[in-house]
Amino acid sequence: MTVQKLAFPTTHVRSQVSEAEWQTRVALAACYRLVATHGWHDNVYNHISASVPGEQNAYLLNPYGMAYEEMTASCLVKVDLEGNILFNPDDTYGVNISGFIIHGAIHEGRPDLECVIHTHTIAGMAVSAMKCGLLPLNQSAMRFATVAYHDFEGIAVDKDECSRLVRDMGDAEVMILRNHGLLAAGRSIPEAFNNLYRLERACQVQVQALSSGTELNVPTPEMVARTSAQYSRNPAAERNGKSSPLGMLEWPALLRTLDRRDPSYKS
């Protein structure tokens, strides 16, 4: 089945942004496509955002109303931290207010994080409803030394919630939004996607393990801490005695997979 993609004026958009912003747009569009490929999207809802290089108070967000599998570098909307649209390639679409309540808050409060991903997956929402939170049942869950939690405050449309989102995020890279879904962030788009991949798989494992009805084997706190520390060194990606940030080794392979399926995200 061929999916018809919406056409945006690629040349026109690229000529109006810096080369650094264009490369961020390409990577962010790829991230949207990858999330769709894994089935982690929720219709046209949710968001993935990325800071605009060289612009302290601007980030890129999806046009509200387009599917994740339609995202391209040219269609992404640039907004400021208040949610004001700075550049929109097609006025047919605006942005979802929740996109800058959640994402604007994290980008402003945690400028070290370039990319923020928010999802409503079945497994993620299931774990978000569990009082126990995320359990260290497998090494994907133990990847995170800290998992932050934010209590449900209704649909994220009130700016008053921003300060509490940042407070609850603290210095973590992932946060479970209680009775809502997941949030994963990173110092780069590849790192943020890798964090979401690990977090989502950990949630899937937890849901299936708990549904088995058998007694679970939970590692000791010492083993959890040891495993998390091992991940922080990323020994699996070591080359010449040096390790790369999590997600960077996998990213080119993921892009090659996208290119074989449909390279239009680059347009």
Image: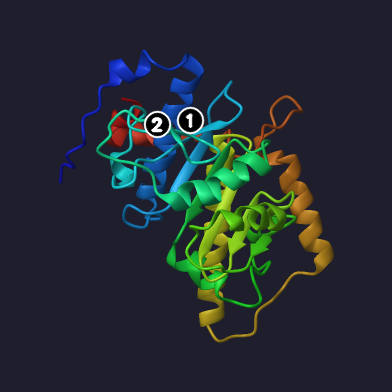
Q: Between 85 and 71, which is closer to the camera in this rendering? A: 85
> Residue at left 33%, top 27%?
74
203 in relation to 94, above or below: below
244 in relation to 235, above or below: above
Q: Between 199 and 103, which is closer to the camera in this rendering? A: 103
Name the amino acid, label 1: Pro
Q: Is residue 223 left or right of residue 91?
A: right
How many numbered markers are drawn?
2
> Residue at left 53%, top 40%?
82
Task: Determine which of the numbered discs, if any, sits on residue 175 in the image.
Answer: none
Q: Residues within 10 Å of mark 1 (few under 14, many from 20)?
A: few
- Circles 2 and 1 in contact, beta carbons < 8 Å: yes
> Residue at left 55%, top 75%?
129
Q: Residues within 10 Å of mark 2 (few under 14, many from 20)?
A: few
Q: Between 3 and 224, which is closer to the camera in this rendering? A: 3
Name the amino acid, label 2: Arg
Check disc 2 and report its element: helix, strand or loop. Answer: helix
Q: Which quarter of the rendered picture does the C terminus lie within?
A: top left
- Mark 2–mark 1 distance (CA, rounded to whole Å): 6 Å
Where is residue 264 shown, x and y percent of the image?
28, 30
Where is residue 41 shown, x and y percent of the image?
38, 54
> Residue at left 74%, top 28%?
242
Where is residue 48 shown, x and y percent of the image?
47, 44
Q: Is residue 69 left or right of residue 115?
A: left
Q: Residue furthest right?
A: 222
Mark 1 lies on residue: 252
Where is residue 8 shown, x and y percent of the image?
25, 27
Check disc 1 and report its element: helix, strand or loop. Answer: helix
Mark 2 lies on residue: 256
132 in relation to 8, above or below: below
